[in-house]
Image (tube, helix red, strand yellow):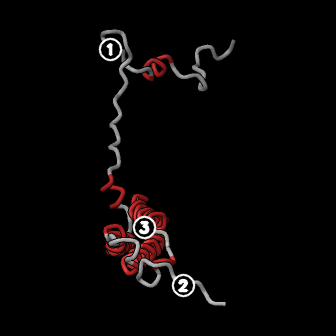
């Protein structure tokens, strides 16, 4: 066999093969080099990667939505905290119904407006929670008023007597 003295280039040399194995600890285990652990990305580091325009849009939309939610909460609070003096108090019931409808409409509008920055990932989806709760509160108050003080024609004109029957 010719060439027995020459090493085969496709086979690594015995010394090289031995040096490729990890070093052995005194306990007989292989010692591997420890790779540095990558730090977990914090909220601050993910926000730092956003553009300046996205950060400005996030702050602007958040500020607008805070004001819109406060206005909606005020309307809902007026609808919930106002109490009519009785079934004859049509002005009180009309005020409660008006504020309830306005609060529900405003909450629905704010909910839809909140979807835009949430879908663009300028704001966290938690921002959808506040207008949704206000919408449910306004609708619940409207339903409660309708169930508790049904519209009664007997009190239509401010008297406890039934309304006169139509002639003819």
User: Tag 2 or tag 3, which sits nearer the N-term?
Assistant: 3
- Say which residue label 1 marks: 25
Secondary-structure class at tag 1: loop
- 158 over 129 or under it: above or below: below
Q: CA distance from mark 2 to mark 1?
A: 105 Å
> For this view, does 35 lie left or right of residue 146?
left
Secondary-structure class at tag 3: helix
Where residue 138 is drawn, which disc sits there?
3
Q: Quadrant of the N terminus?
A: top right
Q: Can you give x and y, in whole percent of width and height, for residue 35 in the image? A: 35, 34
Q: Can you give x and y, in whole percent of width and height, for residue 80 in the image? A: 35, 67
Residue drawn at point x = 67 percent, y = 90 percent: 168
- 26 over 99 or under it: above or below: above
- Say which residue label 2 marks: 164
Number of numbered callouts drawn: 3
Q: Quadrant of residue 81?
A: bottom left
Q: Within 10 angstroms of label 3, few (less than 14), some, or many (20 or more) residues?
A: many
- 107 over 158 or under it: above or below: above
Residue 31 vs residue 41, the one in the foreground: 41
Secondary-structure class at tag 2: loop
């Amino acid at each position: 066999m010719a060439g027995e003295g020459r090493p085969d280039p496709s086979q690594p040399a015995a010394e090289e093969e031995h040096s490729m194995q990890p070093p052995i600890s005194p306990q007989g285990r292989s010692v591997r080099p420890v790779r540095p652990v990558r730090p977990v990305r914090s909220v601050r580091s993910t926000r730092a990667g956003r553009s300046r325009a996205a950060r400005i849009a996030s702050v602007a939309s958040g500020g607008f939505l805070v004001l819109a939610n406060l206005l909606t909460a005020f309307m809902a609070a007026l609808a919930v905290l106002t109490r009519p003096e009785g079934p004859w108090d049509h002005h009180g019931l009309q005020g409660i119904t008006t504020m309830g409808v306005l609060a529900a409409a405003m909450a629905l509008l704010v909910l839809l407006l909140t979807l835009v920055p949430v879908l663009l990932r300028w704001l966290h989806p938690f921002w959808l929670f506040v207008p949704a709760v206000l919408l449910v509160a306004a609708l619940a108050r409207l339903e409660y008023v309708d169930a508790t003080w049904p519209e009664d024609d007997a009190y239509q004109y401010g008297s406890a007597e039934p309304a006169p029957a139509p002639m003819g």
